[in-house]
Image (cartoon, helix red, strand yellow):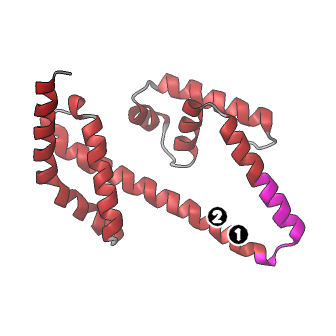
Amino acid sequence: MKSESKENNVDIFKKYFDEYFDDIRNFIYYKCSDIELSEDLSQEVFVKLWERMDSIKPESVRSYLYTIASNLFKNHYNRKKIEFKFISTLEDFDNESPEFIMEFKEFDIQLQKTLSDIPEKSREVFLMNRIDKLTYAEVADRLNISVKAVEKRMKKALEIIRSLTKIKV
């Protein structure tokens, strides 16, 4: 990329940031009622805009920003929901037997090890699909790869998980 082009991108990005940041932050704030979270997610929205500046058409920037903001909020919400369920499960351990607690900890260790054994690209696809609940098409779009590539990566992840564990996925 030429330096003129970079400078032009910076100027255009600043224009979009100045024009839309407050609206995007408010949009997220209305969903979550948490000003710090809305500011953090809004900054992530603009990081994603910066990463895709060369491929976004000026007439679709506003729509792109709102779509990204909505998706980031949904992903954050879904992660929090999973964390809450997990923490609730841990809190229930007070009433569980020591054997159950030990088995759960061993399972968690095995799960973490298995996830770390999956190649990064396959693990990323697996987690985006299974944790963030993204469709293959959404994963492909976010990673800028084909749906077929997502399918291959998912297949590899599932094969590794099945070979290393007794977990049905």
The structure residue drawn at horizontal position 62% and vertical position 65%, both measured from the top left corner, is 85
Q: Please name the residue that numbered disc 1 is placed on.
A: 90
Q: Which secondary structure dominates the residues rendered in magenta?
A: helix
Can you give x and y, in whole percent of width and height, for residue 54 in the image?
21, 29
Within the image, what quadrant is residue 143 found in? top left
**Image marks 1 and 2: residues in contact by CB distance under 8 Å:** yes
Q: Please name the residue that numbered disc 2 is placed on.
A: 86
The C terminus is located in which quarter? top right
- The amino acid type, in three-letter code, at marker 1 is Leu
Q: Nearer the viewer, residue 26 or 136?
A: 26
Segment colored magenta:
94-107
The structure residue drawn at horizontal position 51% and vertical position 23%, both measured from the top left corner, is 149
- Outermost residue toward the right in this view: 99
Q: Is residue 4 left or right of residue 73?
A: left
Can you give x and y, in whole percent of width and height, for residue 157 in the image?
65, 32
Can you give x and y, in whole percent of width and height, for residue 57 in the image?
17, 32
Q: Is residue 1 left or right of residue 160?
A: left
